[in-house]
Image (spheres, grey):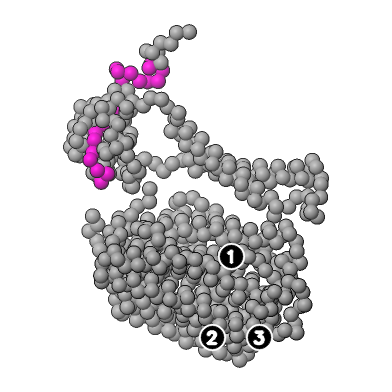
Amino acid sequence: MKLDPDQIREKLGIGADKVYGVIGEFDDPHELVHAGRKIREMGYTKLDAMTPFPVHGIDDAIGIPYSKLGWIVIPVSLAGTATAALLIWYVGAIQDKFVIGGKPLFDFTFSIPVMFELTILFTAFATFMGMWALNGLPRLYHPSLNYKNSHRASDDRFLLVIEADDPNFDAQKSAEHLRSVGAGDVEVVEG
Amino acid sequence: MSAHTDNYQLESARWATGRNVLFFAALVCVIGCVAGYLQDPARFFHSYLIAFCYTAAVGLGAFFFVMVQFLSGSAWSVTVRRIMENIMYTLPFGALLFIPLAFGLKDIYSWTNPSVIPHEPSMSGKLWWLHENFFIARTYIYFALWSLWVFSIYRQSTKQDTEKSIRQMHIASRWSAPGLFLVVAVGTLAAYDWLMTLEPTWYSTIFGLYFLAGGALTFMSIVYLVAVGFRRNGILTHSITLEHYHDLGKWMFALTAFYTYIAFSQYILIWYANIPEETQFFRHRMGGSWLYVALSLPFIRFVIPFFTLLCRPAKRNFGILTFIAIWSVAVEYVDLYWVVMPMYSPNGPHISWIDFATLGATLSLCGLAFWSRFRAHKLVPVGDLRLEQSLHFENA
């Protein structure tokens, strides 16, 4: 089978004819947070920020909701707790009824350490995998890499993105808006 | 950035009101203690031991956390650090609060009567340690060591208010590193002496941490309650923000888990080994209606506070945090009560007004020492170089 790059691009919604959004560049985190808040007040909802380190207050400024990861993690954690209890109960009190050290066949006292450990293990898995799933990882390509200064988002620049699927998006106007809140270098980036 | 600034000096009228309330409470409670002693000395001394250990545990928790703030160089805590330091300042006053106990050792500890001590091999190595004068001397050595550190660190911190130099921070950090050892090692010995020797044949090496972990949680809850009390009265409203309360909530959550970890570790090892000298602790504390107290402890000390504080919005909600803080402060007393009182009334708890008088007395006397500091010094360490950073602190 021959891979057709155009077909793949079409499927992923990327390519030179598509627009990912407008990216503006800032010199320091405070400017980014200020600009982000102003842009959001203009009515934009699909915003993103790329920064070399976590910037406090940016989530709130550009309206990124609090992560839903916790709602994935808690049921899996409790499943871990239950798995450990059921496993110890089934193996010790149903399958192989050995009295060890004069202890009862099943007791929460000796199950709790394992219940605790399995809770932690399941929690770690759910957190890690849930984070990957919610972020759409692994991902080999991201349109923001088409921005000429994208590498500086891991060094000394703070990028603010207005994404093209924002209902208010208009390449010309949005670029103008970013300049008006103080972005140094503004570019329309292809998808 | 912020246009608002707080008044960092407590108004003297407000300070006087607080002092009068505490002074009145102390007066009433001390009279109550004297009456309790005249009515039933054995009951009074047991109650007083709980109250004394309660305030000492809070003081030790404060001592630990103030030093941790200096060593970690944390910025978030700067605006609440003076509250922590002023609670730490009450620790040395434990030496005064201990005086009544020194006269009641015979009423509390069975080892003071050699004829009662069971002649068991496990006791032979302990007899030299369990001696009344040596016991009192040890307690004063503990307090002397702690006081030296507490006053030295406190002095540096308040000196920084006027000097505004990094030098005081460095000196306080140098005191803090060995100080942490002092909290845990000497605190463990103190817990062994004051509480573990209630059962002279019993031993549990983790018991010191059990005592300190409970005290640390109570301390964090009290810091929160003091800060919220200030907030309600319009004091430091711009300096201690929701972000700081969120962090105090995280600490309350973490210490709840830590306490449970220690308490359960102690229980499971004793349960598993099933050796008579060790199991007696739980046997005595599950006798009669004490059983219900023992069975409720996992729920009141872990399940309720842990699951209440688990999600982030709960730690940013004043109502929920205040509830859990008051809850934690109360259950610490229930916990200590459960450790001490089965020695006095083996068949179950009998709550008496003497319990309230003794706890009120130690709390209000420590409260006076705590409150007196707010007149002598600013409400926040104004000379700390990280204050500005702390004022603008935000949780990620």
- Residue A38 lies left or right of residue B243; in this view the side is left
Q: Can residue B114 be spotted in the picture? A: yes
Q: Residue at x 75, y 42 (%)?
A: A91
Q: Residue at x 28, y 59 (%)?
A: B388
* Res. A118 image quadrant: top right
Disc 2: which chain?
B
Disc 2 element:
helix
In primary-sequence order, the first of circles 3 and 1 is 3
- Residue B60 lies left or right of residue B334; in this view the side is left
Looking at the rendering, the stretch of residues picked out in magenta corresponds to: A9-30
| Same chain? Circles 1 and 2 | yes
- Do callouts 1 and 2 mark residues in contact (Cβ within 8 Å)? no
* Amino acid on which the number 2 mark rests in the picture: Ile
Task: Measure the C-alpha gap from mark 1 to mark 2.
Answer: 25 Å
* Amino acid on which the number 1 mark rests in the picture: Tyr
Disc 3: which chain?
B
The residue labelled by disc 2 is: B99
Q: Quadrant of the N terminus of chain B?
A: bottom left
| Same chain? Circles 2 and 3 | yes
The residue labelled by disc 3 is: B106
Question: Of residues B237 and A24, which is closer to you in this image?
Answer: A24
Task: Measure the C-alpha gap from mark 3 to mark 1.
Answer: 25 Å
* Amino acid on which the number 3 mark rests in the picture: Lys
The residue labelled by disc 1 is: B210
Callout 2: 10 Å neighbours few (<14), some, many (20+)?
Answer: few
Q: Residue at x 68, y 75 (%)?
A: B126
Question: Of residues B139 and B105, which is closer to you in this image?
Answer: B139
- Do callouts 3 and 1 mark residues in contact (Cβ within 8 Å)? no
Task: Measure the C-alpha gap from mark 2 to mark 3.
Answer: 14 Å
- Residue B366 lies left or right of residue B287; in this view the side is left
Q: Answer whether residue B321 is magenta in the image.
A: no
Question: Of residues B37 and B106, which is closer to you in this image?
Answer: B106
